[in-house]
Image (cartoon, rainbow, N blue to C red):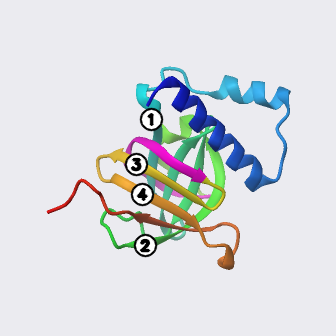
Amino acid sequence: MKKSDDASMKEKWRAAREKMEGEEIGKEAEKKKETKTPKGRKSGGELSFVVHEHHATNLHWDFRLEMDGALRSWAVPKGPPTVEGVRRLAVETEEHALEYGKFEGEIPEGQYGAGQVIIWDKGTYEPESVHEDKIVFVMNGAKMKGKYCLIRMASMGPKNWLLFKMKDKEKKE
């Protein structure tokens, strides 16, 4: 991906986010967002992702994609799919700082999300298309590889999404 494509993709993320949150981002807020962009970005427009296996009250996986200088997050109760044809509920949760992507350890009793957190997978991803209710991206992790899709299930509430692995075009046998 060229630098102009990277800038275009960032603009798509920003526009989709503005539309979803129903907020207008002024010039001052835009400056703050620019300063949050991680340094040392990999070439080709790749962004980071992490999946935390979270042993909280209920075991679940926290699926996190780097967007706008933060980790946009979804809780996936049955774990992210690694094969085509498996669809998983992904409930959107609060964003986390990029640094949280490196966290592994114990969240103490009495704190929200108390329990063991383990990095289940991590790597980079490249967004292919970004719309208000659908995000298509290519994952490059140890366990999650290939094209994936997140689709908002509006009929089940604004935070409920479906996460699934799409067919790889190159995988023709």
In the rendering, at what x and y percent does residue 147 appear? 38, 54
Residue picked out by circle 3:
138
Q: Residues within 10 Å of mark 1 (few under 14, many from 20)?
A: some
- Amino acid carrying label 1: it is Glu
Q: Residues within 10 Å of mark 4 (few under 14, many from 20)?
A: many
Task: State whether residue 32 is above or below residue 47.
Answer: above
Task: Provide the residue span drawn in magenta.
Answer: 111-130
Q: How many marks?
A: 4
- Amino acid carrying label 3: it is Val
- Amino acid carrying label 2: it is Arg
- Amino acid carrying label 4: it is Tyr
Cα separation, mark 2 vs mark 4, equals 10 Å
Please, what secondary structure does the residue beneath circle 2 have?
Answer: strand
Give the mark, 1 or 3, whose residue is nearer the N terminus. 1
Cα separation, mark 2 vs mark 1, equals 24 Å
Give the mark, 2 or 4, whose residue is nearer the N terminus. 2
Q: Quadrant of residue 32?
A: top right
Quadrant containing the N terminus is: top left
Q: Which mark is residue 148?
A: 4
Give the mark, 3 or 4, whose residue is nearer the N terminus. 3
Query: Cβ–Cβ below 8 Å for labels 4 and 1?
Result: no
Question: Residue drawn 37% across and 73% down?
Answer: 86
Front residue of 74/127: it is 127
